[in-house]
Image: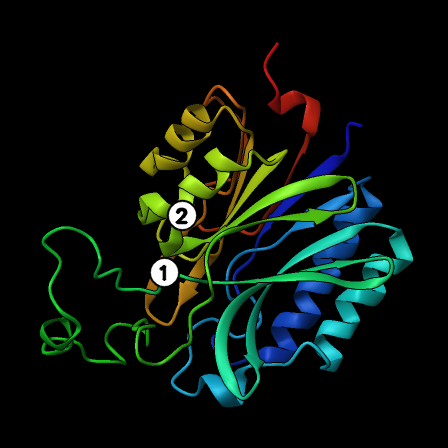
Amino acid sequence: MNPRLAAIQLDTIPGEVNRNVHKAMTWGRRAFEAGADYVFFHEGLTADYSPEPMRNGRSLESWEVFGFAALAKQYDGYIALGLNEVWQGRPYISMVFLGPDGIVDVYRKTYLWPTLTRPGAPSLAEWLKTYVPHEEGYRCERGVLCSGTGTRVIAVGDLRLGCLICADGSQPEAWATFRDDQPDLVFWQNNRPNVVNRGDAQEHAKELRTPMVATNRCGFSYHHFQSGGTCFIADDGRVVTKANEEGEEQIIFANLDELRGP
């Protein structure tokens, strides 16, 4: 088993769901046409951050999600979509896996930003004293979005994928899931300034002895410029391949065997 993996970093527009979905499906098709078996997108691809998460969120039964499922079926592959989701009447940041038979499973972000459980972190009330929504790009997730029930390992086709989203990665207990139940590959979705230059993804991959794909958006999220740095990391912490860090859209590829040590 040596599947071909593709990771895509895109510049999506806050609130412009139709445009974002159309662009992502076009890029996803390019990845499949280039031989990918699995296609990984970034966090919150469909709507980015929004002052109206219920209006801009989509359910699993939406035409947008169906479109990605149809694409996965057409190419007999798998897609990991960053969905601004509405589930059971509440908004979430979600990672939806789609395959030839439709929806495989869903992971919903657990540790919302700002991650106030860190030592020395202020209370939410203190943090909100200086929070101005439009200046921060509507990035306060706590109190606005709902949280999931913990990081998970999900079987997607032939692979067992460890799932976490952006701020999840700042919590030790999020990574403990994968020490207790080692996946074939950890998938870390992001929407932050840069992924590869922080070095935290490399450290976690090495500590877990598990390969990783870390995706990130690029371009402008409101006025915040995200430079990209989407990457594939080997189980010894080496960056095997990475996308540009200049904020440009790009697809990168790796075979799973490239990410495994001897």
Label 2: element kind: helix
Report the residue at 75% width, 35% height from top.
Answer: 4
69 lies above or below 50:
above
Q: Which mark is residue 174?
A: 2
Q: Mark 2 near mark 1, Cβ–Cβ under 8 Å?
A: yes
Query: Which of the two residues, 198 or 11, is positioned nearer the viewer here?
Result: 198
122 lies above or below 40:
below
For the C terminus, the image quarter is top right
Question: Where's residue 59, x and y in %?
Answer: 64, 81
Question: Where's residue 130, x and y in %?
Answer: 11, 75
Task: Name the residue carrying label 1.
Answer: 111
Q: Which amino acid, mark 2?
A: Ala
Q: Is residue 143 left or right of residue 196?
A: left
- The Cα atoms of the two marked residues, 2 and 1, are separated by 8 Å
For the N terminus, the image quarter is top right
Q: Which amino acid, mark 1?
A: Tyr
Q: Is residue 35 left or right of residue 13?
A: right
Report the residue at 52% width, 75% height from top.
Answer: 47
Question: Where's residue 147, x and y in %?
Answer: 42, 70
- Tell me which label, 2 or 1, sits earlier in the chain: 1
Report the residue at 9% width, 78% height from top.
Answer: 129
